[in-house]
Structures are given as C-alpha cells and as structure tokens.
Image (cartoon, rainbow, N blue to C red):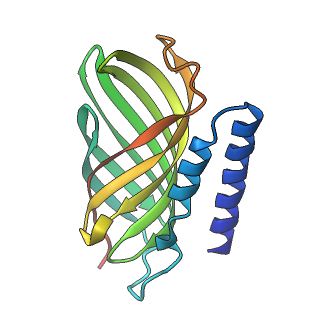
Amino acid sequence: MKQTLLFITALMLIIGFSIINAQQNLIPVVTVASVLYSGEAVAEEKSRDLKHESYPELGILISPPIVSPAFGYWFGPYGVRVSGMYLKEDLNEFHLNLGYKRLDNEKKQRSINILLSRIEGSDQGADYDYTSLGVAYSWNSLFGVRGLFAELGMAKVLHDNLGNVTDEFLVPCGYIGYMYRFTPK
C-alpha cells in the first residue's frame, strides 16, 4: 500500500512539473490529483482480499460516440485490458490498458492504469485522428452497483494526423460502462 502511494505521488509530481515547465494551465494537475487520490482506495473493507488473485473480466464500455466490447485479464495485482470498435473508416477507437490494482475485494476494485488509445472520430465542430498515452484511474462497482465501471485520466497526444489536438498538452482519456469480473470463489 505504501509503495503504491509513493508511486502515485511520484507520478503526480512528474506530471505536475511537466505541466508547470511547459507553462500550461494547472487544471490537468488538479484533475489527475483528484482522480488518483480518491480516498476510497485507502479505506479498505473487511471483505476477502483478491489483490493477488488472477481472473478474467468482460464488459461493454462507452467512449462517446462508440460502444465497444472489452476483454481483460488480471495476473494477480497486474492486468491487461483491450477494448475498441471499428464502425467505419472515420469512426473507430482502440484502447490497450495496463493496470495495477490498488484495491480488490468481492465488492469493488480500484486500479491505476497506463492507457494507450487510438481514436478516430468527430464531435460537434471538430474531427479527431490521434494516438495518445496516458494515466487513468478506474473504479469497478461505482456507487455500490456491482460491475458499474468508470476509468478517467489524462493523456499526452503522441501522433495527431489532423493537427487539431497537437497544441493540447494533455487530453482527457477513459470510458464508462459495465465490467463483469469473473472472480475466484
């Protein structure tokens, strides 16, 4: 637990100094800090600890405007998840997620993740076609609803084919949906 908090603190400092050195707005630092330091993961419950258990997960995630399947597997405290959908040439998303469990029991799971995303699509007034790498925090069993899932964070754009997010230092990343964990009995 202490090692995880030290890792998160170091990660926040790196992101914070990068933003300050780039003379950018501090809003992304505040956003990342509030996501990473949600007090929920610190107050562990008396349920059976599953942090070192291995199990698969399957779900449906929404990253507007795309609804896509997600498949994952936790190898003890470390996990991998892939999700995405190709709808048409100019509307598709793919995500690769590498995670570390901060909390995992029968009722809920919390993890910090590295998220690699490839996004092509549009919203009102802008088109997107970029690849990003970021840090996100995930909550499984949000608001006490088993399986309700959210993952939110910030990412650095690695490659922008259209050039409309190149000037952004960080972009939001993540998704919401339902993720069923096939936990061991």
Say above or below: 125 vs 135. above
At which x and y percent is residue 47? 38, 85
Q: For residue 52, say whether it is visible.
A: no
Say above or below: 160 vs 71. above
In front here: 37 or 134?
37
Q: Quadrant of the N terminus?
A: bottom right
Instruction: Give the number of callouts.
Output: 0
* Residue drawn at point x = 77 percent, y = 35 percent: 21
In front here: 176 or 70?
176
Q: Is residue 151 left or right of residue 64?
A: right
Say above or below: 68 vs 106. above
In front here: 120 or 166?
166
* Residue drawn at point x = 36 percent, y = 15 percent: 127
Question: In terms of image quadrants, where is residue 48?
Answer: bottom left
At which x and y percent is residue 92? 30, 24
* Residue drawn at point x = 49 percent, y = 25 percent: 131
Q: For residue 67, say whether it is visible.
A: yes
* Residue drawn at point x = 49 percent, y = 42 percent: 115
At which x and y percent is residue 23? 73, 31
At which x and y percent is residue 55? 36, 64
Q: Is residue 24 left or right of residue 36?
A: right
